[in-house]
Image (cartoon, grey):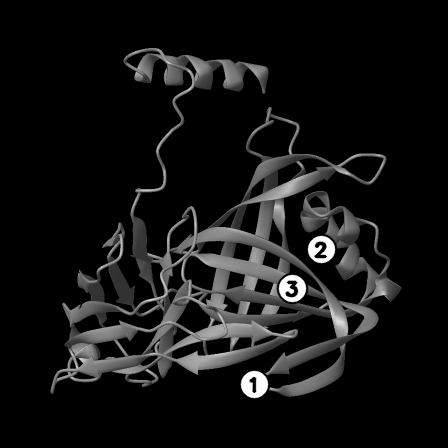
Amino acid sequence: MKKHIYVLFVLITLACADNDLSVDPKTENYPLRLIVDADEGGDLPSAEDYGLEITFADFIGELPNSPITVHYEISDLEDDMIGAVSIDKIVYEVELEDCVYERELDFTASADGLTGTINIAPDEDLGSIPESFEVVFVLPGLDETEGRFAFSLTEIETEENVILGAPTIFEYEVLDNDVAGEWELELSTEEEFENFKLVFGPLNDELNALSFEDITGKVKAEFEYGEMKFVIELAEEEEVTTCEDGDTETETVNKEIEIEAEYDAEDGELEFEGSHFIIGEDGEIEDELDFIIEAGYELDEDNGVIVFTFFNVIDEDAYAEGEELFFNETGVSFTFEKD
């Protein structure tokens, strides 16, 4: 930490022409930047809609309390997307007294729905325009949908110190790899659970400490665009209260453990990359290390199952041959059913 402070001190000193250390960085005139939250994404072929978040990048100070108009364009449509993609609605959330309310922003669209403007109006309860909002697109929703499209913010009209920042363009494509979607595994014996812990226990201390009686046996694998997670359902339950648009609901649910990762799947080979915490004897987090899981998969579309075979798990930041977190030359396999 001291080294970083020293380097920062040197940089500031060099940046000041008169070497006056009383000069503070001028941040009040730095413009607010409106960006698309991701530059690419996608969903399953059957998806009927898709939400894209538009947000203000990290900023200092408060957001404006006057309207801003943003121009948009939907372009580069291919295959089934042609003539089928448009904006359904634009929504944002406001939290009041522990309840979340969804509200809409006005927008105007051209006759073909491919260009238009979004009116980002101040919200009385927020005292400013919203920090982020979601553009919800209508998609073909066909089981065999193919194609892609692009959405871009093209222009901004405002008297405030606000500009369009990078990225301004989002590209959507149908998620059509073999593992995409949700899969479910039933761990029905203690031996199956112990094998599961051999692979994933080193990545989660809570999971590693569980016994077979502590779980329901249900494990989900949820593969989205570039990201996935394993969700392990626990036998222990808890009450969860949610409030949306003034309606409060309390339900009893099973607690869960999640292991998240980015993934790449192609031609029967599967690789995961993520990070996991190292917990000390005092129960506090000591470090966070990156991990890599090398696996394979075999898809049986006719029966709606997929077999994942895991070969090794390594700490990417602290790896030496023979020191894998998990290693099995022939692999440990689990059969998941399409959910």
Question: In the image shown, does 29 or 100 lie closer to the viewer?
Answer: 29
On the image, numbered disc 2 is attached to which residue? 196
Image coords of residue 79 (percent x, y): 17, 76
Mark yes or no: residue 327 visible.
no
On the image, numbered disc 3 is attached to which residue? 231
- Residue at 18 percent across and 68 percent down: it is 71
The Cα atoms of the two marked residues, 2 and 1, are separated by 41 Å
Which mark is nearer the camera, 2 or 1? 1
The Cα atoms of the two marked residues, 3 and 1, are separated by 28 Å
Helix, strand or loop for disc 1: loop
Helix, strand or loop for disc 3: strand
Question: In the image shown, does 267 or 44 lie closer to the viewer?
Answer: 44
The quarter of the picture where the C terminus appears is: bottom right
What amino acid is at disc 1? Asp
Q: Is residue 154 above or below residue 60?
A: below
In this view, the residue farthest toward the left is: 111
Callout 1: few (<14), some (14-19), or many (20+) C-alpha neighbours within 10 Å? some
Mark earlier in primary sequence (2, 1): 2
On the image, numbered disc 1 is attached to which residue? 245
Mark earlier in primary sequence (2, 3): 2
The quarter of the picture where the N terminus appears is: top right
